[in-house]
Structures are given as structure tokens and as C-alpha cells.
Image (cartoon, rainbow, N blue to C red):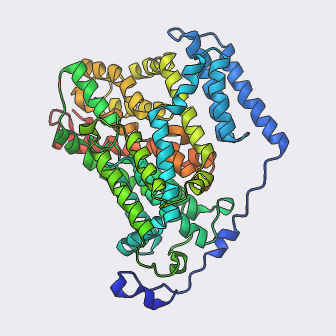
Amino acid sequence: MAEKDFDKSKGLPPPPPEIKVAPEVEEHPPAPEKPVKNIILSVIISIGIGVLIALLPTPEGLSPEGHKFLALLITVILLWVTEAIPIGVTALLAAAGLILFKIQPGPQAWMPFASPAVMFVLMIMMFGVVLNEAGVAKRILFLIIRAAGTNVKKLSLFMAVSATMLSTVFHDATITIILIFCMLPVLTAMGITPQKSNNFSKFFILLIPLAASAGGFGTLLGGGRNPVMVEVLEKVTGYKMGFMEFLVCNLPLALVTGFATWLIVYIIFPPKVKEIPLAALGEKLPPMGKKEKGVIGFFALAFILWSLTDITKVHYSVVAALVLALIFGFRLVSASEVFKKFPWESWIVFGAGVSLGTAMLDTGAGKWIATQFLPMLEGKPWPIVFAGAGLLGAFMSSFMSNSAATALILPITIPMAQALGIPEAAIALSAPITTSFIMLVIGCPPTIIAYSTGYFSQFEFVKVAVPWAILMIIVVTISAAIYWPLTVFPELPFLGIK
């Protein structure tokens, strides 16, 4: 691209000296297909471990259905992580297994695939395809480049903190869709396809959903787990935490998680490219046409209606369906093209995750795990109790919705806080905070959306998500142990030291 297209009047930096990105792409040729014998071995090991767990004596306090569920869950997780068979097929087998082993009746096993949350994710993922088809994603990228520049460190840090802070107010899936689809044209222009994915592409495609998920606890608007925590706290203790109190407690911690997420992902997948080549951005954008203006207008309408859902009581999925109907009805984007390019397999995987989460609750397996783990925290300093409850929250929300995980854990942790003389609200806040840090790709819509691009595998996600979740719990625990005693909870000992 000519240097004149990037003058000061456009707010963009001049092109850097010669940038070579091809070598990194060439170092990562398409991954060879797994040999059949490796696939068979992975399947045998996964099923064998599940059978072994099922044959063990049922632990005290765990129902037979819960025992069978845990055996099935381990098998499914191993099949997903090894990708021995297509993950969409494994997802369907997960629900089928719930019926086959009489863990859940047929309707209950399949119903979560069409739940409001799963349908909302389907339509949010469609929004991403719409953004790309209409050319809006590329226009948003130019605005981001104008604000942050082309230096990879600065740009990625800007995107991470922006994703985290925006997700304290807006749905994290929406923020993920916008930023992910902004990056995809750049990767394509640089010759980085899903088959030739490298550290640069994995860094950005993993960073965006993790940063967005990490910010959802910042305000009561950030996700369903937040009002659930307020509701359970009031029900158990009679204390109602207000909007501003919740914000003052959590928003500074959310800012910390944005920076920490960027640093952790950068260390695990350090990109070799230091500057995004301006040529990858394409030619100077023409003025917005009617289609772009229409899509942006309807997206703005969706944001407004989503922000009013507490008043209107209209579910997020209804708003999404309405906006898609308007976009397709006015022929702003071809519906057939969107359906053709939609990542159906990833959506099926999310549906299976919700189905497994429902089964974990219905069989009592989730409550059994919580009651086995949490008593070990009794008598410990409050930061240890906070972090321990948080680790359980992160684990649980990897298999079920974070709202469900929050509702499951709080009835156990709040009485524990009361017994230990710890402010109930301080320990209760650990649930919405740490259920933001998931360990499996099925854990939340942002990670499923990112996975649908094909730029990383399930194993690569676990490689970054597990240490990320653990380190994030440590980061927020230390931050809370410093910040809360000085501000919102003066009765707490600083850093837990009496």
C-alpha cells in the first residue's frame, strides 16, 4: 500500500521498514493427519479409563447416576482433548451416552442443545459471519489500528484490555465476535490459514476470548453469574449488594485480569511477528455503503435492546433473532452465504457442554465434588478460602454455565465463611469472579467462537487455559487481598495476615 494512504490525516502510522512474515508461516506446515493406529489407541484409552471409573465402587454420597456421569464425562473430555474423532461427533455421542447409560432421559439430554443460551450463541456466531460478509469487521480493525498502531505488543495489549473492560458491560460473546472477525482478514492476508496456524495467529485468537471472558465479573451487567451471586447472597444472609457496591468491589480487579491475561498468553504463545504489515490491511477503505451502514445500525439496535433486557425482560436470544431477521430481510447480507460459512461443529460442541452441565447438576455429581473439596479449606486464612473456592468455581464452569456453577457453589461457601468469621460477601464474590476463568473450550461462548475459526486445537487450548485459569485465580486473590482490606472490606486482614 502506498505511504500516502497512511498519512497523519488518516490517523495511521507510516509503514514500517520491510517486514518479513513468510518465514514464520513456512515454519508451521499443515499438520499431518493422525495415523489410524494413533486414533484407535486414543479411543481405546479414553473409553478404557471411563470404564475403569465406572467399575469402581460408587463413593459415599454420590448417586449411581452421578457415578456413571463422571465416568462418561472423563471419557468425553479425553476424546475432545485428543481429538481422536471429530469433536462434533464426540459432542453428539456425549448426549447419546447420557441416554444410553440411563443418566438422563432422552428429552433432558437433547433439550439443552436448543436452550436459550445455546441458541443465543448460535446467533452471536452468525453475527460474526455477518460482520465479515458486510465488510464491517475490516472497518473496525482500521479504527483499532488508528488507536493502537501496528506494533504487535501494543496492539494486542490494547485489544486484551479493551475486550476485558467492554465485557464488564456487554456480553463477552459479542465482544469476542467483533474482535475475532477483525483479525481474520489480517491473518488471511499474511498467508496464515488454519492449516498453517502459528504462534502469531494462536496468540491473537486465544487472547481475545480469554480476555473477554476474564472481564465478565466487573459489573452486574457483565453476565448472568453476577446477579445470581447477589440473589443467593441475599437469600442466604439477607444482605443485598447494590450495583455500585458490586462495581467498586470488582471493576479494579477486572482491569488487572486484562493485563494479566495478555501477559500469560504472550508468554505461552509468543508471536514472532513484531509489526503487523500494513499491506495486510488492504487498500484504503472506501466510504461506507448502505449495506455496512445498515448492519452497523442493526447491531447498534441489538446493543441498545440488550442493555435494556433487565427492564424489558426480553431474553438476549430474542433480540439476536430479531436483528438477524432484519439484516436478512433487508438483504444486507446473503442468508445462504452465512449458513454456508457458519461453524456448525463448534456450536454442537457448546450444546453438548450445556447438556453435560445440566446432567452434572441433575445427578448431584457437581454438588458431590463441591462437598468433597470445600471442607478442606476450613480454618485457613481468608485468601486461601477465596482461592480454593475459586479453583472449584473455575473447574465447575468448564463443564457448565458459570451461572449454574455460581448457584451450585455459593450455598456451600457462604455458610463456610460465616463459620470462619469471614464477611460472607467477600467469599461469595469469588464465585462470579473465578467462574470467568474456564479450563476447557466448551466452558463459555467466547472460547467456542474462537475455536470455530480452526486456528488452534483443543490440546493447545488446554495448554494455555489451565495455567491461565490457575494464575488468574492467584492474581485476583492477591489483588483482592490487597485492595479489599484497604477499601470495601476493612474488617478483612491485609493479605490475610492477622
Residue displayed at 45% across by 36% down: 117
Residue displayed at 28% across by 33% down: 227
> Is 167 placed above or below 423 here?
below
The reply to whether residue 261 is in sight is: no
Query: Residue 106 appears at what percent x and percent y?
Result: 60, 19
Q: Nearer the viewer, residue 345 or 396?
A: 345
Query: Residue 312 appears at what percent x and percent y?
Result: 26, 38
> Is 101 placed above or below 152 here?
above
> Is 254 placed above or below 380 here?
below
Q: In terms of image quadrants, where is residue 153?
A: bottom left
Q: Nearer the viewer, residue 340 or 249?
A: 340
Query: Residue 200 appears at what percent x and percent y?
Result: 56, 64
User: Quick check: 298 left or right of 206?
Assistant: left
The reply to whether residue 69 is in sight is: yes
The C terminus lies in which quarter of the figure? top left
Query: Residue 427 appears at what percent x and percent y?
Result: 29, 30
> Is 433 placed above or below 17 here?
above
Residue displayed at 53% across by 8% down: 60
Q: In terms of image quadrants, where is residue 155?
A: bottom left
Count numbered badges in the picture: 0
User: Quick check: 25 left or right of 297?
Assistant: right
